[in-house]
Amino acid sequence: MQRWIIVTALTTALVGLAPAAQAAPAADPDPVTTVVTLGDARIDPKVPGRVRVDVSYVCSVADDARSLTVSVEQKDPQDSASIAFGSSRTAEADIVCDGTQQQRQLTVQSKTVNWIPGAEAVVIATVSNIGATPSAAADSRRVELVTE
């Protein structure tokens, strides 16, 4: 019986020494949310070194500047050493963040060889917001490039 009393007294004393549980921090009432969605990617028939990529995005109002970047990379299925790639960045002043859906079409110029119709390409679109958490939102996928 004495042992049980001693164990109970020690347990009670140790529980009193444990730090009090802290409440979870309150959620930010107006979090900055950005969503990016890729649309079609089409090769310009007049300039086969250019591909036009449709992008839609939604971002909430924020004080920080934003930028939109689209990158495209395509390997030649018949020549593994031949890779077409390029990227395009939209000026910060051209990014509208007011909580409504925005549509953009960016032209990406290949820096190496012309784009190949019917071959798969990796397309990535990113909206960056320096100073925010998270600092970027992106969408990526494999698409078969087609001619307009």
Image: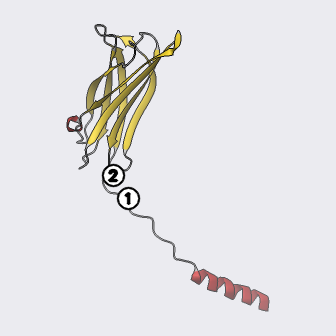
**Number of marks present in the image shown:** 2
Spatial CA span between label 2 and label 1: 8 Å
Residue at the spot of label 2: 31
Label 2 close to label 1 by CB (< 8 Å): yes
Q: From the top left corner, tell me how far across and down residue 48 is, in percent.
A: 34, 10
Percent coordinates x, y for residue 67 in the rendering: 29, 37
Q: Residue at x 48, y 71 (%)?
A: 22
Question: Residue at coordinates 38% horizontally, 63% vertically from top-left?
Answer: 26
Relative to 46, is 1 on the left or the right? right
Nearest the viewer among 60 and 80 is 80
Which element type, helix, strand or loop, lies under badge 1? Answer: loop
- Residue 140, compared with residue 1, is above or below; it is above
Amino acid at circle 1 = Ala
Residue 51 pos. (x, y %): 33, 17
Say whether residue 1 is visible. Answer: no
What's the residue at 68%, 88% (across, down)?
9
Q: Is residue 7 above or below residue 88?
A: below
- Residue 65 image position (x, y, % from top left): 25, 44
Q: Amino acid at mark 2?
A: Pro
| Residue marked by disc 1 | 27
Residue ranking furthest to the bottom: 2
- Taking depth in this image into account, of 72 and 142 the one nearest to the observer is 72
Among the 4 quarters of the image, the one containing residue 34: top left
